[in-house]
Amino acid sequence: MAFPSALSALWSASLLTVLFASVVRSNIVYDDDPLQPVTSDEMVSVGGTVTLTCRVAESDNSSLQWSNTAQQTLYFGEKRALRDNRIQLHRSTPTELSITIAEVQLSDEGEYTCSIFTMPVRTARATVTVLGEPSKPQITGFENPVLEGGTVILTCTSTGSKPPASLHWYRGEEELKGGPNVVESVPDDPTYNVSSELTLEVSREDDNTLITCAVNHSSLNPGDKRTEQALRVLYSPNVQIQPQSTLPREGEKFRLQCLGDGNPEPMSYSWKKKDGELSLLAKADGALLLFEMLNKSDNGVYLCNADNGIGMSQGEYTLLVQDSSSSPSAAPPSYSSLAPTPTPSVSIQLNGVYTFADDAVDNADPTAMSTSSGVDHAVIGGVVAVIVFILLCLLIVLGRYLIRHKGTYLTHEAKGSDDAPDADTAIINAEGGHSGAEDKKEYFI
């Protein structure tokens, strides 16, 4: 009885060996089978078009066939089997069958089968993944303006993505760190809704700054879908006082304008003079302070208060009225809240040499006029003195010249008397005596 049992065991072992060899041979033939169809997985966005291609290395005149996820035949060779106008034949040859599916829907996702009807039938599968394109993001939280120094919470939401999208925040070009993405599935739909929050402490520099929420998804190119919103920040005004001119002169009209940069714009302005009262000729008109005629008594520091309902701010301006004959090169007055810059004092010597010395700011006279006018007067006085001195010298020289050249002359009566030896002979030799007095003539020698 043992012998038959041994034969039975040997036969069983031989059968297992043959079956194992057959399986191995079957796998080898499968890998190198030229009739085995080859496909590839595809990915497409909702609304797009996908192409499914099935190829074999060799043809034995057997037909290729494509079936959908429900195993319904789409195409058998060149023949349409399912009446769906979205599905069209792309190419049909003995070694290839390609079809296209247009206007892809989420329900088109799944495994598609390519078969070749040989003995035995050979098949290959292709997985189609349909991407749900996310919607344009929506930002909420901008309903009301935010006070300077306050906190704003913004929420960005995008729907319809598959797989879930990711959201990113930006302030201008700077990426901000927002909260984590919250993913929610949609009932009876394979898509997802994604949201993210951003908490931001704002300053006045953030007013009108663009806050951006961008969607990142495999169905989109970077930056394809984003939403921008401008922040609105309320802040108190920043006040500056602008003068009509940098060189106010005594006797002229003059104007100061209060500029308040705030959100909203200032609604009220008030003017006052530091350590004093406004002059009777100074009139406040809203943001303007008007001087009908400047006077040295108008010198001082003027303050402007601007109020926009959010807060009140103050600006200041130091007015230094120049003399009406001041040179245009005189130093302009200082304004705003900046400290005045000390200017060098000038002393003029009689010999025309100028010396400069730096005085302390505390010793500076705000009403002092420019020294250039004093310099001009000194020069003019020197020129006049020189001219007077030259004229006196010319008069002295001319007088001495006239004295030295006084003339000598003889009358006609004395003609010939120069040769007489004595006085009697000269009288005798005289011609005409006194009878020819009417014919007397004088000659300059």
Image (cartoon, grey):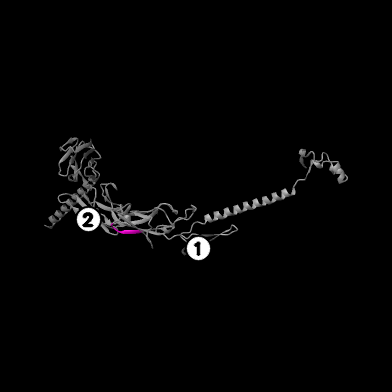
Q: Is residue 312 magenta?
A: yes
Q: Nearer the viewer, mark 1 or mark 2?
A: 1
- The front one of 16 and 24 is 24
Query: Which quarter of the image is occupied by the C terminus?
Result: top right
| Residue 84 is a magenta residue | no
Residue 203 marker:
none
Rendered residue at 19%/35% (across/down): 78
Residue segment shown in magenta: 309-314
Residue at point 22%, 39% (across, down): 100
Instruction: Give the position of the N terminus as an image quadrant.
Output: bottom left
Say which element carries label 2.
Answer: strand
- Name the outermost residue toward the right: 421
Q: Nearer the viewer, residue 445 or 274?
A: 445
Circle 1 is placed at which residue position? 359
In the image, what residue type sits under mark 2? Answer: Val
Give above or below for 361 relative to 435.
Answer: below
Q: Please state the horizontal and vertical placement of residue 72, each as a whole percent of the image.
A: 15, 41
Tell me where residue 332 appears, x and y as whole percent.
Answer: 45, 55
Direction left: furthest residue: 1
Q: Amino acid at mark 1?
A: Asp
How many circles with numbers are drawn on the protein?
Answer: 2
Q: CA distance from mark 1 to mark 2?
A: 70 Å
Q: Secondary structure at mark 1?
A: loop
- Horizontal arrangement in the rendering, residue 258 relative to residue 73 (left or right): right
* 349 vs 116: above or below: below
Q: Quadrant of residue 376?
A: bottom right
Between 156 and 267, the one lying in front of the other is: 267
Q: Which mark is residue 182?
A: 2
Residue 89 visible in rendering = yes
